[in-house]
Amino acid sequence: MTALEHLEVEQRGGVVIARVSGEVDLSNAASVTDRLIEATPNSATALVLDLSGTQYLDSSGVRMLFELAQRLRNRGQELELVVPDDSNVRRVLLLTEVERVVPLSSSVEAAVGE
Amino acid sequence: MTGRPSLLEMLGRLRWSVRGLLPPTSPVVMAQAFAYLYGIGATLSLLSLLLPHDPDRWVPGIVAPALIAYGVAALMVIGFERIPLWLFRLLPGLGAVLITSLVYSGGADAAAGYATIYFWAVLSAYYFLEMRYATITLLVCFAGFAAAMAAQGDTADPAINWLLVATTLTVAGLLIALLRQRSERLVALLGEAQDVAHIGSWEWHIPSDEVAWSDELYRIHGLPAGGFPSSHAELLSHVHSEDRDAVDRTLNRALEDHAPFVFEHRIVRPDGVVRILHGGGQVVTDDGGRPLRVFGTVQDVTEQRRTQEQFRELIESAPDAMVIANDQGKIQLVNAQAEHLFGSPRDELVGQQVETLVPERFRESHPFRDLGTRGSVELWGLRRDGTEFPVEISLSPLQTEAGTLVSSSIRDITERKRADVLQRSFVPERLPEIPGVGLAARFVPGGTGVDVGGDWYDVLELEGGRRGVVIGDVAGRGLHAASLMSQLRNALRAYAFEQHPPAAALEHLNSLAWRREGVVMATIIFLVFEPGSGRVLLSSAGHPPPLQANPDGTTLFLEEGRSLPLGVSRQTKYGEAEYLLAPGSTLLLYTDGLIEKRSTPIDDGMRQLAAVVGAHVDDDLEVLCERLLETVSGVEDDVALLALRSVPVAAERMELTLPAEPLELSSLRRALQRWLAECEASEADSYDIVLACNEACANAIEHAYGPGDASVHIDAACAGDEVAITVRDYGRWREPRGNNRGRGLGLMETLMDSVNIVTDPNAGTKVSMTRKLNVR
């Protein structure tokens, strides 16, 4: 069985950019969280999580984002999310009020440029 | 014509009469001709006294004939209206005597000079009269001359005189021939004009009871032209025996009051042909006010009257009210239907403006005169008593001698308007969309469309997703049938909603029909269809059997479950039959209009129906309905038909049992997405429903304990535009803890229209959610 999600990580200066494509649900949310923490070295100032390629994100994925933000904050690092303006994932994030805790951008450039 | 006209007036009248309007044998024409002849002759003979003369001449023998001739001329001019015909016949003879006297008295040498008088006499006779009068006059003059010459004896030189006379007469003959040639064309033209108009003229000289006719009048009567003038009694003998009294009355009245008169009567020709004549006349009185002459014109109006009669009959026999108006909008002709429709007698309608037939507020825009209007227009009509009623008007132009008339055909559509409203209320405006059932229906009113038919159909949503389907046919047409139909329809609805099975419902309906006054006859089928199973429970009250068509094209009529029509017997027990409609099978309900045609036996109609339905088992039901109506086009009766198809329910319902494993969630989502696509849910709807269902399942999976309860059961159904999903687990619902746990439930509640969670400590948790699909 192929993995639901695919993870790509790159680093630009002090910012780690991670792209999650595929789906995030109860079955893989915990592992995706762990892998993202691992991919973010202590030296990094921020993690930009690009969800542009994410087709599905349920409440487990939302829980993952809150957890990720908390753990990065504990390490003095920022979390930023990139979500296309009219995507289904953005709707879910707005419905669950993620944007109150984690800033949302519509493109990686916008997120990195800040 | 009372009072004495002046001489000039009389002369003027004489000139006028020559125009061919009076018969040539008319005293007026003859008086005129002889006045000229005698006047000119007398003048010429007096003038000859001035010429160099023969010493032998005897002046009194010249002056006396001239004076007599003047006297005759004067008599003609003054008394022409009173001269009887026999007097005219004496005049040529008198002329001969006078000429003889003239020639004899003139002396031998002047005889040639007097010959010129003949020249003028003959020429005038021709000019004013006809050839035969000229010939008679010529012969008379010739005889007179010969007599005079003989009497003179040897004093004259006969050779020279005869030569001169012969020369003069030859020139006169040539001139006559020339004139005749020229005038013949005129006569021909005049004759043609008379032929076309069929106008003849006549004159009745009362004292002598002589009637003179023009040639055209002879033609009209089918008699040889130029027949001898006849008497009044003979004239009446040509008149149709039934009209004789009327003609006599008209004439007698005219003879009393001397007023101009108009008459119309039939005549019978010698060959038996009947013609219709129309004419007018005028009585001329003498100084004492006694009728002297009656003259008049006659026209053969047979063709016109027949055309008018046919036209009137046509108008009268039209099924609709007809109003014919001229281009000024004035009503010229109406039929009895129009009298009835507008509540006004004929003589009141004719002469009115057409605008008075429509209510005032429509008068500016009324289409009565606008021939640009094509087809028919619906409008309001106004009765004499002020009531208004809806009408349909069609206009057409009518070319007549009196110009262009506008003919309006007017139909009272009150009944049809009522029928329209009623009819619309009898059949559902839109058939409900039901999962598992395909439905299509048609209603085509037969006949003229004014009456309401007694056919109807109905589709009801019953408890448990079952459908009630009804088709019925009340005997008769019109409002009575319609109101009965509406009662039966509504009563059956009530019985159906109260869960009465078909047979019981029909029994109730039958007893209801018996409680009604008057004769009630109706056939009806009530069936209940269960979409999931395809089960059909059917009861028929004498209605034509439904036709089942299987997916392979085979067909059969469902004859079971049939009893007597409603209203036949109070004791009728209605039976029920159960059928199974396999997925893809079609059931056709119809009224007898579809299979009954006057020209073909009912069995043929049913065979034809089965063939058409069998050939379209794979087609859309709407297509099937159209085809069916095409094959029965030209029906006299109403046709109602309703086609029902059992649709495979796979697309409408999905059941899924998953192991309570997080990894199963993605396959749940795939299955759900596929199913929702089949339900024609939009992508956004699909995302929301899948997400909500995923949350419910995720919750169940997170709370599953042990192997016994390690499964999640999903039941999804799509009914119309509503999706209902039930997620059931066999574990124990745990109240959500903390923020994160609440998010799943929050999402479900936000995404779905309703979320209902029932937890049983022993039986597990059931989450029921519904969501309306947005119309794409």
Image (cartoon, coloured by chain):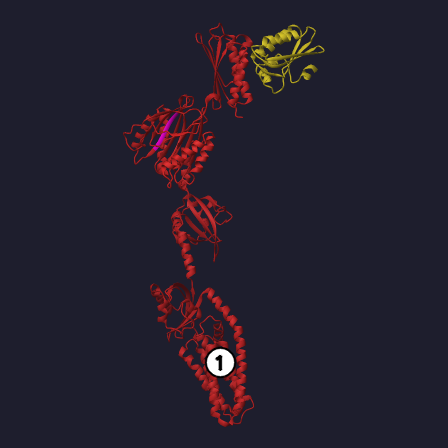
Tell me the residue that label 1 is attached to.
B37
State the residue in front, B270 or B307.
B270
Chief SS of the magenta region: strand
Judge whether residue B103 can be spotted in this image: yes
Q: Is residue B771 above or below residue B15?
A: above
- The residue that appears at 63% across and 8% down in the rendered structure is A35
Q: Is residue B22 above or below residue B560?
A: below
Q: Say how many tags the image has.
A: 1
Dot 1: within a 10 Å radius of its alpha carbon, few (fewer than 14), some, or many (20 or more) residues? many
A35 relative position to B400: left or right: right
Judge whether residue B296 can be spotted in this image: no
| Image location (x, y in percent) of residue B769 | 48, 17
Find residue A99 and report its image quarter.
top right
Residue B89 part of the magenta segment: no
| Span colored in magenta | B523-528
Q: Chain B takes which shade in the image?
A: red
